[in-house]
Amino acid sequence: MSAKPLKVLACGDVEGRFTQIFNRVSAIQKKSGPFDLLLCVGDFFGNNETEWQDYKSGKLKVPIATLILGATNDRQASYYTEDGQEMCENVTYLGKKGTYTESSGLQIAYLSGLESSSEEGDNSHFGRKDTTGLTLPVIADTKYKGVDILITSQWPKNVQKYASAIEGIEDGDQLGSEAVAEVARILQPRYHFAGLSGIFYERQPYRNHKVIAESSRHATRFIGLAKVGNKEKKKFLYAFNVVPLNKMESAELNKPPQDSTECPFPLSRFWSSNQIADTETQFFYNMSGKNKQGNKHKSDFKDGGDRKKQKKQPQATGPCWFCLGSPEVEKHLVVSVGTECYVALAKGGLVPEHVLILPIGHHQSTVSSPQDVRDEIDQYKSCLKKCFKDQGKGVVFFERNFRTQHLQIQVVPIGGSAIQEVKDTFMECAESESISLDEIPKHSDLKQIIPVGVPYFYAELPLGDKLLHRISKNFPLQFGREVLCESGVLNMPERADWKNCKISKEDETTMTADFKAMFKPYDFSLL
């Protein structure tokens, strides 16, 4: 039996009509909600800088968690500074390309901007490298089932083939992007939303398999959305229910709709057998026979041989900044690599010794990670506690399983009276934010308390206290960091925003080397 469906809204080009769309969404929430998520495709910002500032400052509120795509022209590029950026409360910029996994398990692939003929693309265009970053891991994954939703700025080219004509368009063959069509063909989304064309078009579902020749797969529904507030009153807001595909039985997921057609997109001319074969090489995390300290890693050898035998780790379906095999990882920050996890210096850390414990493979949270990953997390925690204890410090570990794709355990050492006061500071800050922060038994197992898929904030404190909050909505993303910046702990409010703490790559490399040297006597991965 399937899980409870999520209620999702998809919206066409907002073009700066923020109050109009958010008022409409609020009305729908009261009448037919609650909805879990709003997805915005096409041009989000337009030219309405004044109205946007009201939302950015908090004067006006966004009523629902909202995910947006990136710039579609150079003028808008200044709004977007980094992937995963929280633009204002409840509005998150996904990035140029990638796959975002909701805490519910819903997978959303995204591709921002217009198609470029170049390899790299630019601020408002995606290039060949962006599309292959999405598709190459999928081609190499024999267990890939698809994604729930794909959102793109542009339509896919020839989407109307085998289907009803696009109303108001004389030559539909000239509409859309060939590269977007290829991404849709390979990712096989259950729903695909796009904007920019000023048209509403709901295509008949198309099959992602060849009838008789291939096993049945789920169908894709493409919906092109019009601009918000368009004079022709074309549909710009689309509501639907969806159960994440990883929570559905295969028979239910792959049941073909009665009106489904053939897939309109042919296998691309872009792919060659060599390209597909080469994708396997990107999935292994340690490219040499030695670890960063120059020592043979304990997992490098088997049965006394000299040949490296690596475990293949689970991979994200799109780019991930924290999967160690990903090209996006900043490897100059890596401190230690175990068999299942690694430790890295935190970017924009609160203190020089602020590090992260992360799984090597793609796991979203502690509770969704397998036992061997959780065991090695505990090993790293134990080693880090011993390391900092010898310096007269205690350690705060905290994790936020909310609006994040890859498990990150923040590790922040504190000293002096802060060790005694940090629990009270957490509780006081939680009360001021109307957050229900519960103390759980010191020897409890988080996995036995929180079901997989439930968003949460969890902290372990130096005296053994464990604090837990089940997130329902509007949780402050920097809560753990903000608490530690309070006067009773680190007393550095100016460092609450990690973006204000960035340093040069050269300084990061030096700090990483210093931490490695300090941690080396305690690092179990070197034994």
Image (cartoon, helix red, strand yellow):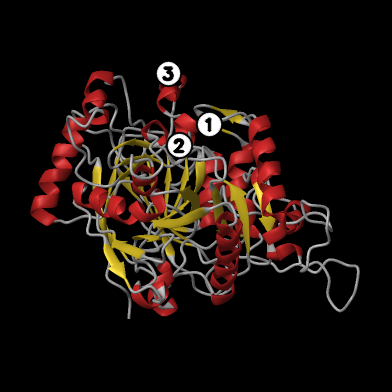
Disc 3 versus disc 1: distance between alpha carbons? Answer: 26 Å
Q: How crowded is mark 1: few (under 14 residues within 10 Å), some or many (20 or more)?
A: few
Q: Of label 3 and label 1, which has the lower sequence position?
A: 3
**Element class at badge 3:** helix
| Quadrant of the image containing the N terminus | bottom left
Between 225 and 462, which is closer to the camera in this rendering? 462
In the image: residue 108, left or right of residue 334: left
Q: Residues within 10 Å of mark 3 (few under 14, many from 20)?
A: few
Q: Where is residue 474 in the image (x, y as percent from the top left)?
A: 25, 49
Query: Is residue 264 visible in this depiction of the protein?
Result: no
Between 61 and 146, which is closer to the camera in this rendering? 61
The residue type indicated by label 1 comes to Lys
Query: Is residue 122 visible in this depiction of the protein?
Result: yes
Choose mark 2 or mark 3, whichever is in front.
2
Residue 283 in the image: above or below residue 350: below
**Residue at 21% across / 32% down in the picture?**
58
Q: In which quarter of the image is residue 245?
A: bottom left
The residue type indicated by label 3 comes to Arg
**Where does label 3 land, which residue?**
75
Callout 3–callout 1 Cβ contact below 8 Å: no
Choose mark 3 or mark 1, whichever is in front.
1
| Quadrant of the image containing the C terminus | bottom right
Q: Position of residue 164 (x, y in %)?
A: 36, 50
In the image: residue 266, left or right of residue 366: right
Task: Return the mark for residue 498.
Answer: 2
Q: Of label 2 and label 3, which has the lower sequence position?
A: 3
Between 206 and 21, which is closer to the camera in this rendering? 21
Q: Quadrant of residue 220?
A: bottom left
Disc 2 versus disc 3: distance between alpha carbons? Answer: 27 Å
The residue type indicated by label 2 comes to Trp
**Where does label 1 land, which residue?**
502
